[in-house]
Image: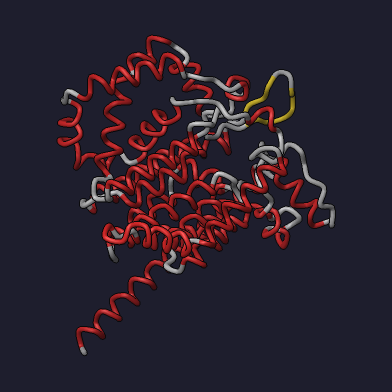
Amino acid sequence: MLTQLQEKTDKSTGINKEWTIALALGTIHALMVAVVNKIVPNPYMDEIFHIRQTRRYCDGDYTWDPMITTPPLLYIISMPLCGGHERYINSILLPFTFIGACRFRAMFTGEGETVLVPALSVVLLPVLFHSSLLFYTDLLSLTLVLWAFSSTNKYIVAFFFGLSLFCRQTNIVWAGLFAALDLCKNIKKEQLVKSLLKGCLDLWPFILLAGGFLAFVVKNGGIVLGDPDAHRPQFHCCQLLYFCVFACFTASFSLLEYAKPILQSFFQWRTVLFTAAIALIVHHFSLAHPYLLADNRHVPFYLWRWILSKPIYRQLLIPVYVVCFYAVDQLCKGVTPIARLFFALATIAVLLPAHLIEPRYFIIPYVLWRLSAETRSRLLCTLEALFQICVFAPLFYMFLYKPFEWSHEPGDLQRFMW
């Protein structure tokens, strides 16, 4: 009896701690949004389209802006904040993002600090946190996906994934990942056909979801809602390499405890074949979207201009790609092989067709990978969270206090961001 009471008390304390941190994050975020509103009062970059569409809805005008590519869930839920307060929607969402991250992490590690610190680390991911201070869809999309994966009732899971599709179309891939893993979990070898059929029937909410999405694609003539010419799918294999580098850079401290097995993986015969394959990918599929070349307000512009556009640097990066791939694989060794395979396929499905090099595309696959990764050192996890802040702070400072002008748009301040 005392043991059960203690367990309940510990669990309640853990939940209270999670919500305390979550609410503190939301409060800090709101204060930072207030600073952004003071220094950057007008809608900036993609906000111009998002905020304009939201205010149209508030005025009862439901005409769709043809330059917006994603569905309108963010605009609908932000209507009560019309009139200059739209950015605060992410301050409201952030606590739920953190709780969703804790729930998802607990599926792999249980309760305690091994949940809180990694969850905090992914919420502080610089590209995510920076975009959340503006009126962008990334935080809402991630929150819904995390709550979907961490829910235990399939109907609730399907509900969250369904909502996520009204935020970002590519979330259908993550719904498919959940359905595939659930189906594999329930298949029994001794009753293969029967268990397979039963598993498919149990997944009827996801079948409806897939059917609805397919109907949307057929009626719409494609996945994106607007500006289809700039978002045509491309076979962009290098996106997977960029993702591996992004993941390893962001989780670099947690990777330190796996340095030895990562290096051991590098010195194997398969590395020769793998390196040759990556060399071919780098040579044939290093693509640059016109938006990348035309916009010097983003980090990828400079990475391409200074490094990725140079053939010699591309070749020198090949060993880095190999090591980063092994590191990404090593950190999720605690996950079942079938889950790793399906996650890899889902990540490929999301990233491979994307022509534009955009770090925001990496957010959901990175968070799912990082929260499922096996990390034992609390110190390294804490250093990783501090590292996120150290990366975020200088870029955010530049965004606020180091604006610049384009010669062809004098008087309009441009700002540097991810």
User: On screen, 377 above or below 260?
Assistant: below
Q: Nearer the viewer, residue 330 or 74?
A: 330
In x, y percent, where is residue 5? 26, 85
Q: Quadrant of the N terminus?
A: bottom left
Q: Nearer the viewer, residue 4 or 46?
A: 4
User: On screen, 224 above or below 283?
Assistant: below
Judge from the rendering whether residue 103 lies leftward or rightward of residue 59; answer left or right: left
Residue drawn at x 48%, y 35% as measured from the top left: 351
Q: Nearer the viewer, residue 102 or 169?
A: 169
In x, y percent, where is residue 404? 63, 27
Residue drawn at x 73%, y 36% as measured from the top left: 67
Q: Is residue 249 visible?
A: yes
In x, y percent, where is residue 102? 38, 61
Q: Residue furthest top?
A: 312
What colouring method underlies this structural image? secondary structure
User: On screen, 76 above or below 136?
Assistant: below
Q: Is residue 114 visible?
A: no
In x, y percent, where is residue 409? 74, 23
Q: Quadrant of residue 30?
A: bottom right
